Image (spheres, rainbow, N blue to C red):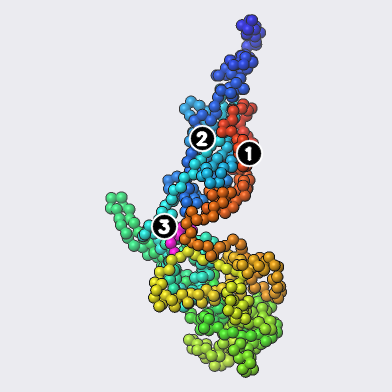
Amino acid sequence: MMQDTLQTTDATAAPGTMVNILCCMCGIPIAPNAANACPSCLAGVADVTKGISTEACLHQCRGCQRWHMDAGKWMACELESRELMSLCLKNVSGLNKAQKGEEKVRLIDAGWIWTEPHSMRLKIRLTVQKQVSGTILQQSFVIVFVVRNQQCIECQAEFRQGSWKSLVQVRQRVSHKRTFLFLEQLILKHGAHRGCLSIETFRDGMDFYFPDKGKAARFTTFLENVVPIKMKASKKLIGTDDKSNVSNYKYTNFVEICPLCKDDLLYLPPKMARNLGNISRLVLVKNVTNLIHLIDPLSGQTAQMSAEVFWREPIRPIITAARSRFVRYMVLGKEPVIVQQNVSKKSATRRNRSKLALLTIAKEDDLGVNDINFEEKSHVGYLMKSGDIAVGYDLTDVQFVDDDAEQARSEGKLPDVVALRKLYGGVATNEDDATKQRMFKLQRLEADKVEAEKSRRAKRDKEDDDMDEEDFLREVEADKEMRINMNLYKTEVAMKIEEDDKQNDSDDEDDQQVKLDELLDGLVIDADKDKEMGEEDIDEDLPWGGVGSGFVEEGGKAAKDGLGYTGREAAQNVKNKDAAMPVESFGKEFMNKQFKFI
């Protein structure tokens, strides 16, 4: 009967018309294909994922948490990120290459599946399509990646002696370390020390060791953008191979920072003062970036000096900013001063002119002894009010190293007092626990000290370092512009103020005082650095057991990168491989997206 039906169909079919056949498995009429099977039966017996591995291995460095790519290259990726997904897909064999005589598999979708945080496993769910006998089949399956530990080249070099290739020596010829304390905060803020093998500190500078010349060049470029420097480069031949014409060098970069520091008092040469906008010859170093910012303490006029100008004609400060030179003054009163605009083009700005004030101050040591007081204009006068304590220079009792400055003082052209900044907190009241009352703290670089710890000089250097650090914290406390380039962290004092909400509102004009909204959370300075891995607090809800990682919301990174994510409860019901399903066309919606995994 069936043969009669087929013969009748063939007889009645018009020339050039395709004749239907019956499926070899279920018997329904279908268009002819190579498998002689309908799409449903073909999906039941075909395996789209044939030749694609369902297990792979990834290597991660335990020290820097980077992932190995290929040919010795390492890449930093976050868990559940798009970059890590791309790295995983590149390690799946059979996904990018078509088998001999078969169609290539097309990737349609990829998503993360939750795994136990301490299992050292990653799971992704892939959806692929493949054309089999003219029918497009789609199938989903799970790939498991085993994460293994392997040290990267940079981390291996940290444990070897003499493995550095390039050395950056940073020096400054001054008697204090406040510049390096500020530079240290800039390095931490921008992460410029990444890739550095080790750091050594000296009294007059720091040494940075790098594994290659490129990373050292990036670091020196960073230094050029933040401080005025001059640099000398040299190289030393370590070995050479005459057959391959390959030589091994070690490079050394000597970087010298400008010796001018914040709050140094200068007496400029006449020509230089004219070139800087006809500014007064008596100026203060306001702050130091890649330029040297100067300010006239009596008029508020500002100027900038480049590193090239300074090194072409170096000048020495008549008074260096040191604690031994500072004199404490009490403010007895103030009056606002409006300065007329300078006839030169580069005059004092309206903002700086509005900050000027005529201060009536007296030495703190003279209170109750004599009635000597001073009246001088000051560029920080707007911060002061009666009863405040300020530090400054007493120009009446100082021996100048510059003959022109000495002559100007004898002619009465110099002020008697130059106020520098206002003191805050327990420092102003001379309390013993003033340092403990600060509501901020700073992070420090992990550096090795080269000097011997048992010598008398080492003990004296330790005292000088503590004094320099305290002076630097006082500068940070009174300069908002300096704090912008630093990360300040809350102490227990700030947390108590925040919890009790007992912070007293300061004067509206005082915009230099440290506010709570400038401070960051999350720094633990008192933690034991020598704590072993087994002694750390392990939280099973954190990635890889919580060792060395912060908390990340489950699926948050995947959602941010536009990837699918299967949560903890749904992951238990995910099958390792689903049955293939016939589809009408390839996944156009997914392929039209802007991103690609491979």
Mark 3 vs mark 2: which is more N-terminal? Answer: 2
Residue 555 to residue 418: above or below: above
> Comparing marks 3 and 1, which lies closer to the viewer?
1
Quarter-wise, where is residue 582 in the image? top right
Residue type pointed to by label 1: Ala
Residue type pointed to by label 2: Thr
Q: Nearer the viewer, residue 91 or 308?
A: 91
Is residue 202 visible in the rendered structure shown here? yes
Residue type pointed to by label 3: Glu
Marker disc for residue 570: 1
Mark 3 vs mark 1: which is more N-terminal? Answer: 3
Q: CA distance from mark 2 to mark 1?
A: 20 Å
Q: Nearer the viewer, residue 431 or 291?
A: 431
> What secondary structure is found at the residue carrying circle 2?
loop
Q: Residue at x 54, y 49 (%)?
A: 545
Left or right: residue 529 versus residue 348 is: left
> What secondary structure is found at the residue carrying circle 3?
helix
Query: Where is residue 319 drawn, in percent x and y?
Result: 52, 83
In the rendered image, which quarter contains the N terminus?
A: top right
> What secondary structure is found at the residue carrying circle 1?
helix
Q: Nearer the viewer, residue 299 or 185?
A: 185
Q: Which residues are magenta?
A: 194-199
Quarter-wise, where is residue 489 in the image? bottom right
Q: Which residue is mark 2?
A: 54
Q: Residues within 10 Å of mark 1 (few under 14, many from 20)?
A: few
Marker disc for residue 158: 3
